[in-house]
Image (cartoon, rainbow, N blue to C red):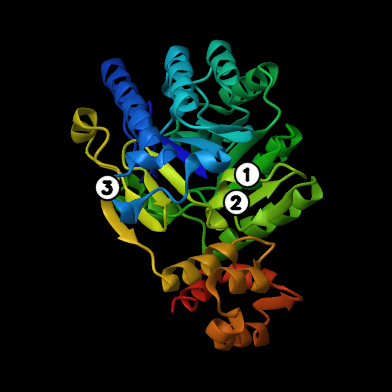
């Protein structure tokens, strides 16, 4: 099982961001940390001991103590706004209330401008062994347009500090198709970042999300690269990262050998996970549910009865088959026919023969023994293909 921990705070909300995140003062952040630790304690009691589950239908069959927690991902927001003391306390609480495997991947998101040597040392001492740093671009002008609080120079300083602190597994987040961005500008970012040799790179094309300043701005829309330029940036990402030794293992994620993000692979493989913190989502015991999204309510009652979260629904066999195909096809490794039959008691051919045959004939899907995967051309139109796997 996996854990996701949400830290909703940031120094300043970026112009493109629609995540549950916002600036807050030190007092609110401290109250939140206390509430989060209370939720961690109460949730640990509920899932690690079946005697704490009073409703027989909802007993903890995905028992967290059976095999231990395989991955932890602390995301946000900007988790690196927490103080060293708060970071230590958070991870101490997690270890006291969950059985965490000795080889667990423990990731934490961070943004440049919020890191220093003391904080990085606290992360390492707490057991964080994977750092994910949000750069987005190496161009200071574009960073200002995005509303980022840092410069390329500050990122370099923070990256070097992370290496000095002992981090040997670092991801860097990048964005393409930004307002006013040229192909040369994006290639320059790719070359500068790969020269640093991080273990993992995630690269996403900008999407205008409703409710963000970018979405509401006609000027920003006029500055966006056209579809052809967006496509060129996408092709350059694949080519340059492949040339520099990064294997593409998911539509937007590239890693050196042995450094694919285990936590995200768990999502795509259907591994159960618990989301703790404001608005965090979970997939546990065959059900999906989410936490409270009101900060005021969460601080008052961080642990709503474990089986009474928001948007609670038990997934059906149909839901799980759809998830298996749609999430699994995001991976370059594709999906397994034998695993599908083992999990659902029916062959993939019986359920999806028509759609698979259609896209194989269009050279958008390919089969290879036990595997079905997207082709390069299929990846380009993956969202359209995924729609046809909804039963």
Q: Name the spot of residue 155 as percent of width and height, x first.
A: 58, 26
Vertical arrangement, residue 191 with respect to residue 99, above or below: below
Vertical arrangement, residue 344 with respect to residue 196, above or below: below
Q: What label does residue 261 carry, if any?
A: 1
Q: Nearer the viewer, residue 128 or 224?
A: 128
Q: Name the spot of residue 227 as percent of width and height, x first.
A: 53, 65
Q: Are marks 2 and 1 in contact (CB under 8 Å)?
A: yes
Quadrant of the drawing holding the C terminus = bottom left
| Secondary element type, mark 3 | loop
Q: Are marks 2 and 3 in contact (CB under 8 Å)?
A: no
Q: CA distance from mark 3 to mark 1?
A: 28 Å
| Secondary element type, mark 1 | loop
Q: Name the spot of residue 24 as percent of width and height, x first.
A: 29, 24
Where is mark 3, residue-wise? 309
Q: CA distance from mark 2 to mark 3?
A: 25 Å
**Residue that appears at 39% across and 55% down:** 221
Q: Nearer the viewer, residue 188 or 100?
A: 100
Where is mark 2, residue-wise? 265
From the viewer's perspective, tell me whether residue 267 is left or right of residue 282: right
Q: Name the spot of residue 306 as percent of width and height, x first.
A: 30, 43
| Secondary element type, mark 2 | helix
Sooner in the amino-acid sequence: mark 2 or mark 3: 2
Vertical arrangement, residue 349 with respect to residue 16, above or below: below
């Amino acid at each position: 099982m996996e854990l996701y921990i949400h830290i909703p705070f940031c120094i300043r909300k970026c112009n493109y961001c629609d995540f549950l995140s916002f600036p807050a003062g030190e007092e609110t952040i401290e109250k939140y940390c206390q509430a989060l630790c209370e939720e961690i304690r109460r949730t640990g009691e509920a899932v690690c001991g079946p005697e704490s589950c009073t409703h027989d239908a909802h007993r903890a069959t995905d028992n967290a103590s059976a095999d231990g927690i395989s991955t932890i991902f602390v995301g946000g927001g900007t988790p690196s706004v927490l103080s060293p003391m708060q970071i230590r306390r958070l991870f101490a609480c997690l270890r006291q209330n969950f059985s965490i495997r000795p080889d667990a991947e423990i990731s934490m998101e961070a943004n440049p401008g919020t890191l220093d040597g003391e904080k990085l040392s606290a992360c390492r001492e707490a057991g964080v062994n994977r750092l994910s740093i949000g750069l987005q671009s190496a161009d200071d002008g574009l960073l200002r347009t995005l509303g980022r609080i840092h410069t390329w120079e500050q990122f370099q300083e923070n990256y070097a500090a992370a290496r000095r602190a002992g981090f040997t597994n670092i991801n860097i987040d990048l964005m393409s198709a930004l307002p006013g961005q040229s192909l040369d500008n994006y290639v320059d970012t790719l070359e500068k970042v790969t020269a640093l040799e991080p273990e993992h790179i995630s690269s996403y094309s900008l999407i205008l999300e409703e409710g963000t300043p970018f979405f509401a701005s006609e000027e920003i829309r006029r500055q966006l690269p056209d579809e052809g330029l967006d496509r060129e940036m996408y092709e350059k990402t694949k080519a340059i990262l492949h040339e520099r030794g990064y294997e593409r293992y998911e539509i937007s994620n590239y890693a050196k050998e042995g450094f694919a993000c285990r936590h995200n692979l768990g999502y795509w493989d259907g591994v159960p996970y618990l989301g703790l913190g404001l608005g965090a989502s979970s997939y546990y015991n065959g059900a999906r549910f989410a936490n409270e999204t009101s900060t005021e309510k969460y601080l008052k009652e961080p642990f709503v009865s474990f089986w009474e979260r928001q948007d609670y629904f038990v997934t059906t066999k149909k839901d799980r088959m759809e998830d298996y195909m749609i999430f699994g096809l995001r991976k370059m490794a594709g999906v397994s026919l034998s695993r599908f039959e083992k999990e659902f008691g029916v062959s993939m051919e019986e359920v999806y023969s028509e759609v698979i045959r259609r896209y194989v004939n269009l050279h958008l899907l390919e089969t290879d023994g036990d595997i079905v995967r997207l082709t390069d051309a299929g990846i380009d139109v993956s969202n359209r293909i995924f729609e046809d796997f909804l039963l």
